[in-house]
Amino acid sequence: MKYLVMVQGSQADYEAMGGKASPQSPAWSEKELQDMFAFMNKLNDDLAESGELVDGQGLTEPAQTRLVGVDDNGRPVITDGPYGETKEVLAGYWVLDCESLERVTEIAQRINECPAPAGAPTPPVVIRPIQGAGGDGEPGC
């Protein structure tokens, strides 16, 4: 079965990783960033070696986001980020092909072990089965 495993963050989290503290997160040092990158690289290497990694990417900060929608008249409405009304955004993801929900849950628990500065938030890791990607009989998109 394939799963989308997501980690969330906020503009403040990205700014903290860039060295700017906020009430939500302390500033990260260069060593703390390197430790986080090393952890993620090791996790990705382990998942690739086990054959469970389909894809995984970190995403840029919300300030580089663009929202595309339509107004009441059906005309496009394009807005650049960040969005004050959105506290958390998708910060990164993995597409994993795991034998069971229990296995992907083990991986999500490991993701939560990623090093961070003391006092930094630890957002939950979200697991979503990918419809139609694991023999469940449902069509995919």
Image (cartoon, rainbow, N blue to C red):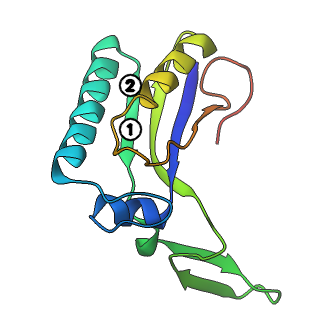
CA gap between label 2 and label 1 equals: 7 Å
Q: Nearer the viewer, residue 13 or 141?
A: 13
Relative side of 137 to 24, left or right:
right
Relative image position of residue 21 (x, y in whole percent): 37, 65
Q: Nearer the viewer, residue 30 or 37?
A: 30
Which amino acid does the dot numbered 1 rest on? Gly
Given contact means CB atoms under 8 Å apart, are the residues at marks 2 and 1 in contact? yes
Which amino acid does the dot numbered 2 rest on? Leu
Label number found at residue 72: none
Label number found at residue 53: 2
Relative image position of residue 33 (x, y in whole percent): 23, 48
Q: Residue at x 16, y 46 (%)?
A: 31
Relative side of 86 to 74, left or right:
left
The picture quadrant where one finds residue 88 is: bottom right
Look at the numbered disc 2 and give the secondary structure of its residue: strand
Q: Residue at x 55, y 34 (%)?
A: 4
Q: Residue at x 47, y 21 (%)?
A: 107
Name the residue that disc number 1 marks.
Answer: 56
